[in-house]
Image: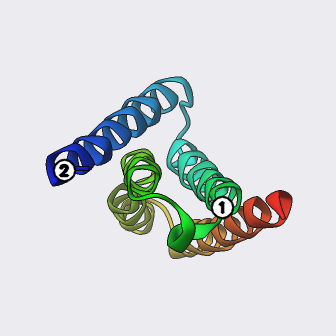
Amino acid sequence: MSELHLHAMFGLGGGLGAVLRHWIALRVRHDLPFATLIVNVLGSLLLGLWIGYLGGPVEMGEEERRLVFGFCGGFTTFSSFAYQSLELRRERTIALAAGNIFLSLILCWLALWLGLFLIR
């Protein structure tokens, strides 16, 4: 399998993930950054499920690994999470910003764990 093919698989996954993230963001409208929280938690759950199903990153074929990590990388968004947390601090309160950070980290970790747990 050529390197170009593997890059294309990563790009395909990333593009599909980004389009799905945008679609969700257009449908989840709220003053608080719920759309970002939803995609980050769902992305963590999907990554856990895919890794568990495909046998983990070490046992996955290179093509599957690039597609999965590309999709999850395009779907989830740390930069939006960081920016929205900063905006919550600027425009609202530090408590809302801290709550967003804490909730995002805990829920994403739990979702990844749940995905791995469900497959095993």
Give the CA separation, mark 1 to mark 2: 27 Å
Looking at the image, residue 108 sits to the left or right of residue 87; the answer is: right
The image quarter in which residue 48 lies: bottom right
Q: Residue at x 57, y 65 (%)?
A: 100
Q: Is any part of residue 97 visible from this angle? A: no
Where's residue 38, x and y in %? 60, 46
Q: Which residue is mark 2?
A: 2
In the image, residue 89 lies at what x, y percent? 43, 69
Q: Which residue is mark 1?
A: 48
Instruction: Name the foreground residue: 35 vs 111.
Output: 111
Mark 2 is on which residue type?
Ser
Q: Is residue 110 above or below residue 35?
A: below
Please say if 2 is above or below 92: above
Disc 2 secondary structure class: loop
Q: Is residue 72 visible?
A: yes
Q: Image point 30% across, 48% down: which residue?
A: 10
x 54%, y 46%: residue: 39
Identity, as a three-letter code, of the amino acid under mark 1? Gly
Q: Quadrant of residue 80?
A: bottom left
